[in-house]
Image (cartoon, rainbow, N blue to C red):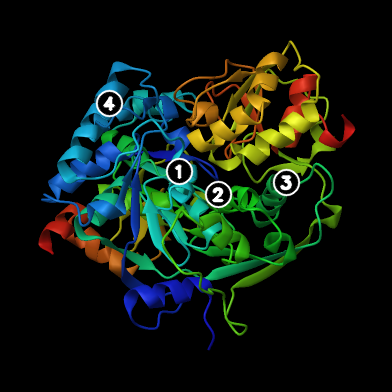
Amino acid sequence: MGQTITEKIFSRHCGKECSAGDVVMAPIDGAMIHDITGPLAIDVFREMGGKRVFDPKKVIMLFDHQIPADSIRAAEIHQNLRAFAKEQGIHNYDMKEGVCHQVVPEKGRVKPGDIVVGSDSHTCAYGAVGAFGTGIGSTDMAFVLKFGELYFTVPETIQVRAYGKFNRRVGSKDLVLALAGQIGADGATYKTLEFVGDTFASMPMAGRMTVSNMAIEMGGKAGIVPPDTVTWEYLKGRVDATPFELESDEDAVYTETRSIDVTDLGPKVAVPHNVDHVVDVAEVAGKAVDQVFIGSCTNGRYEDFAEAAEILGNETFSKDVRVIMVPASRDEYLKILRAGLLERFVEAGALVEAPCCGPCMGGMFGLLAPGEVSLSTSNRNFRGRQGSTEAEVYLSSPATAAASAMTGVITDPREV
Amino acid sequence: MRVWKFGDDIDTDAIIPGRYLTIYDPKELASHAFEGTRDTFAKEVQPGDVIVAGRNFGCGSSREHAPLAIKGSGVEYVAAKSFARIFFRNAVNTGVLPVICKETDAIPDGAEIMVHPEEGYLECNGRRYTLEPIPAFLQKIVDAGGLVAYAKSL
């Protein structure tokens, strides 16, 4: 019987044939901790009797959720994490590089076929480079830090085949929102989502990162795009590895296969307060927005800002909208800066902040007051996610966000 | 031992809002549990109370602050039709037992409830509801008294 990518990855790691449903102890290639969930992982690591982490080279530390420290408490957390990194010989990117899910692939800390865990639910993002990335809690992370391995149930796989070419100003975010709407918030729970077909094959890495990132919004344990020339081209100079093939066998067993033709796909919006409440932009067009956020690990890359800039042209953002833009990493920030986009956005009235999670997790800045409406390119619109529980968060692509930031109301980007 | 009844897709932002994630003490987290979405919970919850919910309880973030906030409030069991994967594991690891009960629709808010995980049922208003068995490898962790105790035994 053939194997899925996921079964192949676990088989290679465990040195035996693994099938979906098997419970295995698998060695870990990378373990990422950040400033929110890292401290608890370290406390529990010590409680478990941990003295030295399993392999300092495989532990990735960075701060992105509350940077620069927004409180004395956050500053103390950063201080403690820095001390732990120093003591253990862990490379700490500190607050200097950006959001974890951008930084890990960017710095070559993940490659195809790896099993990487992060104490952050969007760790599934590393599926964009063909790895099995999955989010875990702090106690599981403590176990990984101590032993370098973790229990997994080898997940079943849902194959999602996308074909066709995107319409103008429609892209990977609209596709993944459409999928969330179809599959539902728990439709892929415990499962890998495997993204195949010519739409994914021709999708640049930035778009793949957007799609894989949101696998968790369907409950997915991982969201894998099979590695191909796009993947290896992206990883060139980042990882020390010779390209190899990794794809599911033709006779691999899926619990479900879905296909979606993107030819007719239009801009999508997730409406409050669930990511799977997805509608066509026309259904909410005209809704006034108080704040637009373009950024996050989902849509904070150069390509996202370039699309926003193309739509903005020489116009300005609406005077009634607070536009907050946050590149996902220092590298992406530099690209935006060097291309002259930063200047254009600031001229147009946006606040461009340094790389961090920003308003996405509602803990640091850009919080919403009761009754306010935000349109955001991030990944979650849960009640209270970006501030008041009486505020509303809508999710969209960078194109829809940019168009809406100009008009002050939710706007179809094809109409500006 | 009362029921705190919740619906489907209760996310970790609802359980503990993002602005409290610099807190790690379960009791302090508990004082903000369900803040803004169900303010009576933190005020009135009593040790031994049980959270009963619909589908996909604990979806969203991997923050272990969520089960810790529940634990800090004295709740030992969450009964739901299904759980989000990361929350389920975090709950087991931190000592809040997630039990799967497909019939939670029939359980009303505020009712008297007793959970008997080892016997595989919960009892509410004189009726017994079956619980699904916990996966074998997780049972080992539960039996050991959580992942920390399990790790120490390795």
Horizontal and vertical percent position of residue A111:
45, 61
Q: Earlier in the sequence, mark 3 or mark 1?
A: 1
- N-terminal of the two: label 2 or label 1? 1
Q: Amino acid at mark 1?
A: Val
Task: Mark 4 and mark 3 in contact? Answer it, CB < 8 Å.
Answer: no
Spatial separation of the CA atoms under disc 4 and disc 3: 40 Å
Q: Is residue A80 left or right of residue A231?
A: left
Three-letter code for the amino acid on which mark 4 is drawn: Glu
Discs 4/1, front: 1
Q: Is residue A403 left or right of residue A21?
A: right
Instruction: Identify the residue position indicated by label 1 in the image.
Output: A103
Viewer can see residue B99: yes
At mark 4, the secondary structure is helix
Q: Position of residue A169 (x, y in %)?
A: 80, 41
Give neighbour class at mark 2: few <14, some 14-19, many 20+ (Cα, 10 Å).
many
Q: Can marks 4 and 1 be said to lie on one chain?
A: no
Depicted A84 relative to depicted A338: above or below? below
Give, as a three-letter code, the residue at label 2: Asn
Q: Which type of secondary structure does the marked residue at label 1 adopt? A: helix
Disc 2 to disc 1, how far (Cα)? 13 Å
Q: What is the three-letter code of the residue carrying label 3? A: Asp
Residue A322 found in image quarter? top right
- Please state the chain letter of the residue tagged with numbered disc 3 in the rendered image: A
Do pointers 4 and 3 mark residues of a single chain?
Answer: no
Of pointers 3 and 2, the one earlier in the residue sequence: 3
Which residue is denoted by mark 4 in the rendering? Answer: B28
Q: Which mark is residue A174?
A: 3
Q: Residues within 10 Å of mark 4 (few under 14, many from 20)?
A: some
